[in-house]
Image (cartoon, rainbow, N blue to C red):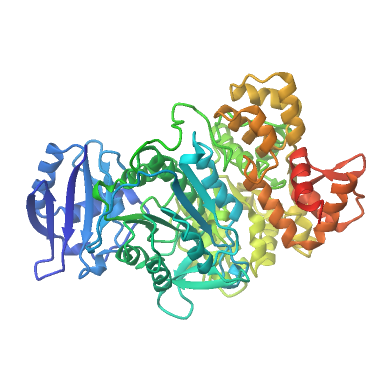
């Protein structure tokens, strides 16, 4: 049982900011140190948290009160209320608060003993916990087609849906937990229509930032043509105000890829949603890295559906981010007015607790030392190239075939066996939506410096005139390379640069770096390691400026039957040869599909259901398959090829469309003809396109 502690910070007076701490009817008063502002964060969230705690409890009365409360209540629910008359304090990352009086120091918003939330003074009732079943959750993922026009990277609808699907698949009784994902386009009117069905939980994934034509914060939703529609907080709250049954909880994810902006993308969204009558809101107070958002989401709901407590679920999710070394653990902010912060009551858990089963979801990158990582011939080939410092290496294969996991494993091994550090830049996180070419190249250099523990001095060294790629090259040659021992520069998903206006400049710069290895000793210190999912010859017009036609290519192949035998043992499954052969025929050894099949069997899905639902929109591979369905529909020139293979079983190879579908991973070559890559694709696409 948690003891509730309320910390209230009031409007500033001549002595500072009055603070009240209320614990079980006892009220302690003191002042917050005014030196807390202006708040300037550093590169160390831990140090910032300790500094913030020191400011909050600089007053001796408050310091003694906190110590007394901690002694009396080891488990305490902490609610922080900042009065509306002190808005300048809202943007401070209070979720970083670290109590240095404990041993070890305790990060309050990431500890199971101290569930943390922000409180708001509104008149709406708290509301009772949800006890009726099913618990209904609505998911909306906004992916308007013209996001690149606003220098925003498109969101991956299938991957975001897969994060939620992976949670739902753990439900022992789907009748108690119903999760519905809105189809595209993600319009405000579609959301309003869906909410009429009485959803208690609402999860929204969208870009969010200051509006282009106003100072209001906006969500980038879509109109009926799936083009960007700016939706302000007043638009959203006005629509919600018309609903008979409001959601009890809203999770608003600003799924950005930029990581350095101090902008508060949702300032005002969460408080105004609370004022509308929503009992609890989770929102992002800064631009959040994609992987951080996905991991937080997954852990949060896994915890919530176990015990129903929103603040405890948020604390646990922050803790997992910190354990995994993901940035931005203080970015998600929970506002809640619920009594005891109990959102879901009644019969729990809604999903099975798999904490005792040491399994890893196939979604995302595998840990370098994962027991489920299966080495292939590509690993040995890649390692030979890594050992030679003059090489530029390029891993090529379709999506979800293991490129990023292979890259991470090679870097892990290089550090361990060669004592060679790595700079790892994943362009899904680093992003490509920058205000200018100069900003991109400068931040690219700063990222390299930070990962090599060098003090960035980009502004000082960026004064020389000339193209940005030359300035970047000069900075590398004159500042970074002379100060550092040999290292690997690993660029994952680098083909995402194709969405920028300076893709040619970037790739030609990498080619220059490769060429300089022959004449400049410092450039031999840096090995280039790239991964792509796109045909490299379509990425840059002039092959003489491309790094890919001078790179050592590494191609990832499907698992063999022998490799499936090894993998099934690692999942500790007892499968007869006939069932293993069935899975091999279904997947053709596709790495993701195979791992997902074994993962589903290891977590309780029966074989018959797996086989029957393999090509279903509701099956375990649904998100993966839906990606291809959307891809084909958006590129209508592929439909005749797909239909021909559906009807005749194969297609000749003399077609640009066939080449692209092979590169995409949908088709493969068999007996000099193009066929579907595996039975799952064949069954799914026949169902979708054979009758068109």
- Count of picture labels: 0
Front residue of 279/62: it is 279
Q: Residue at x 37, y 61 (%)?
A: 285
Q: Relative to residue 395, is residue 42 drawn left or right?
A: left
Q: Position of residue 632 (x, y in %)?
A: 75, 57
Q: Residue at x 70, y 66 (%)?
A: 504
Q: In the orientation shown, which residue stands out farthest toward the bottom?
A: 213
Front residue of 277/595: it is 277
Q: Quadrant of the N terminus?
A: top left
Q: Position of residue 396 (x, y in %)?
A: 72, 47
Front residue of 196/250: it is 196
Residue 519 visible somewhere in the drawing: no
Q: Quadrant of the C terminus?
A: bottom right
Q: Relative to residue 282, is residue 626 drawn left or right?
A: right
Q: Taking 355 as reference, is 288 above or below it?
A: below
Front residue of 31/36: it is 31
Q: Position of residue 647 (x, y in %)?
A: 88, 48
Q: Taking 113 as reference, is 118 above or below it?
A: below
Q: Residue at x 65, y 33 (%)?
A: 610
Q: Position of residue 320 (x, y in %)?
A: 41, 41
Residue 44 visible somewhere in the drawing: yes
Q: Taking 670 as reference, is 459 above or below it?
A: below
Q: Relative to residue 637, is residue 239 drawn left or right?
A: left
């Amino acid at each position: 049982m948690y003891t509730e502690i309320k910390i209230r910070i009031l409007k500033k007076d001549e002595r500072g900011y009055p603070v009240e701490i209320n614990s079980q009817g006892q009220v302690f008063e003191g002042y917050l140190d005014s030196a807390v502002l202006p708040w300037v964060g550093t590169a160390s969230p831990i140090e910032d948290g300790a500094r913030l705690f020191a400011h909050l409890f600089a007053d001796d009365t408050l310091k003694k009160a906190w110590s007394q409360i901690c002694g009396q209540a080891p488990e305490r629910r902490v609610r922080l209320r900042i009065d509306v008359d002190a808005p300048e304090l809202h943007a401070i990352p209070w979720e970083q608060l670290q109590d240095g009086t404990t041993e070890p120091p305790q990060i309050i918003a990431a500890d199971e003993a101290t569930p943390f939330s922000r409180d708001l003074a509104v008149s709406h009732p708290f509301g009772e916990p949800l006890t009726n079943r099913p618990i209904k959750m609505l998911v909306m993922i906004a992916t308007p087609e013209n996001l690149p026009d606003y220098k925003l990277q498109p969101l991956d609808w299938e991957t975001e849906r897969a994060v939620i699907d992976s949670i739902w698949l753990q439900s022992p009784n789907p009748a108690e937990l119903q999760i519905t994902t809105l189809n595209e386009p993600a319009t405000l009117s579609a959301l309003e229509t869906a909410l009429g069905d009485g959803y208690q939980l609402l999860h929204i994934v969208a870009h969010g930032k200051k509006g282009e034509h106003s100072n209001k914060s906006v969500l980038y939703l879509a109109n009926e043509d799936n083009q960007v529609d700016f939706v302000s907080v007043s638009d959203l709250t006005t629509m919600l105000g018309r609903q008979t049954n409001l959601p009890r909880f809203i999770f608003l994810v600003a799924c950005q890829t930029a990581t350095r902006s101090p902008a508060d993308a949702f300032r005002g969204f969460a408080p105004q949603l609370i004022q509308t009558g929503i009992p609890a809101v989770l929102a992002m107070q800064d631009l959040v890295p994609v992987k951080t958002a996905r991991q937080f989401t997954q852990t949060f709901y896994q915890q919530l559906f176990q015990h129903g407590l929103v603040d405890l679920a948020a604390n646990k999710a922050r803790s997992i981010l910190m354990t995994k070394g993901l940035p931005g653990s203080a970015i998600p902010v929970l506002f809640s007015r619920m009594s005891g912060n109990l959102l879901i009551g009644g019969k729990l858990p809604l999903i099975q607790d798999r904490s005792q089963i040491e399994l890893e979801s196939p979604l995302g990158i595998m840990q370098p030392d994962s027991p489920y990582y299966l080495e292939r011939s590509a690993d040995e080939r890649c390692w030979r190239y890594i050992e030679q410092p003059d090489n530029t290496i390029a891993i090529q294969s379709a999506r979800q075939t293991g490129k990023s996991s292979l890259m991470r494993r090679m870097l892990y091994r290089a550090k361990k066996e060669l004592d060679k550090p790595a700079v790892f830049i994943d362009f899904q996180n680093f992003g490509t939506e920058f205000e200018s070419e100069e900003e991109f190249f400068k931040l690219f250099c700063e990222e390299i410096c930070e990962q090599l523990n060098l003090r960035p001095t980009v502004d000082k060294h960026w004064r020389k005139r000339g193209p940005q790629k030359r300035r970047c090259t000069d900075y590398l040659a004159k500042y970074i390379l002379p100060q550092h021992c040999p290292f690997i520069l690993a660029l994952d998903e680098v083909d995402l640069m194709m969405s920028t206006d300076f893709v040619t400049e970037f790739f030609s710069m990498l080619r220059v770096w490769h060429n300089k290895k022959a004449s400049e000793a410092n450039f031999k210190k840096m090995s280039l390691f790239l991964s792509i999912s796109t045909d490299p010859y379509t990425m840059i017009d002039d092959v003489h400026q491309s790094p890919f036609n001078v790179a050592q290519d590494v191609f990832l192949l499907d698992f063999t039957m022998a490799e499936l035998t090894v993998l099934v043992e690692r999942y500790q499954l007892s499968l007869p040869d006939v069932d293993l052969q069935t899975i091999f025929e279904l997947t053709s050894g596709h790495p993701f599909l195979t791992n997902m099949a074994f993962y589903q069997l290891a977590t309780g899905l029966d074989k018959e259901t797996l086989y029957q639902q393999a090509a279903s929109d509701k099956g375990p591979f649904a998100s993966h398959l839906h990606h291809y369905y959307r891809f084909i529909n958006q590129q209508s020139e592929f439909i005749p090829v797909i239909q021909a293979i559906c009807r005749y079983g194969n297609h000749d190879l003399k077609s640009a469309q066939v080449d692209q579908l092979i590169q995409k991973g949908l088709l493969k070559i068999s007996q000099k003809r193009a066929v579907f890559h595996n039975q799952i694709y064949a069954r799914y696409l026949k169902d979708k396109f054979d009758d068109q």
